[in-house]
Image (spheres, rainbow, N blue to C red):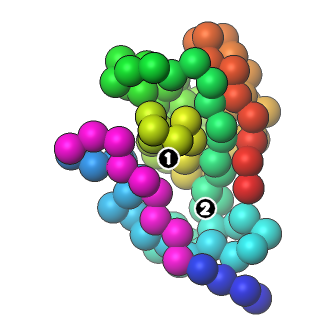
Amino acid sequence: MNTQNFESPTHHRDGCCCASKSSTVDTTGSSVGSHSDIPLQRLQVQGATCGGCVKSIEQTLRTVSGVNDACMDLATGVASVVGMVESSALIEALDRAGFPSTQIN
């Protein structure tokens, strides 16, 4: 199995909620290591322009059943989500909140 260390980017001075949780991710995208077998999903999110948007996106993602943690990088527009959850549920929740998104690898 080809693996690489993955560490989520930070978006504010306190650091991203996912940034302190380094894990090993295989090239198929399933997470192993510090999160055991809990998958890490990444979403490209549109429409985030400020820290308030980031907070809203993170709160929205955390309300989805199965999400253990979520963080958003404003600079890249990428949200990282840890948990046993379908990407379609995350995308639907963000769409309802006014932030269209797509899953990325």
Q: Does the magenta segment cover residue 95?
A: no
Callout 1 secondary element? strand
Is residue 78 shown above or below 46? below
Position of residue 46 measured from the top left corner of the image (x, y, whole percent)? 63, 24
- Residue drawn at point x = 65 percent, y = 40 percent: 43
Question: Can you give x and y, in whole percent of width and height, for residue 62 in the image?
Answer: 49, 33
The residues colored magenta run 5-13
Image marks 1 and 2: residues in contact by CB distance under 8 Å? yes
Distance from the alpha carbon under mark 1 to that under mark 2: 9 Å
Where is 22 relative to 45, above or below?
below
Q: Predominant secondary structure in magenta?
A: loop
Count the marks: 2
39 sits left or right of 49 in the view: right
1 relative to 78 in the view: left or right: right
Q: Which residue is mark 2?
A: 38
Q: Earlier in the sequence, mark 1 or mark 2?
A: 2
Q: Which mark is residue 68?
A: 1
Report the amino acid beneath label 2: Ile
Residue 66 appears in which quarter of the rendering? top right
Q: Quadrant of the N terminus?
A: bottom right
Three-letter residue code for mark 1 = Asn
Q: Is residue 7 magenta?
A: yes
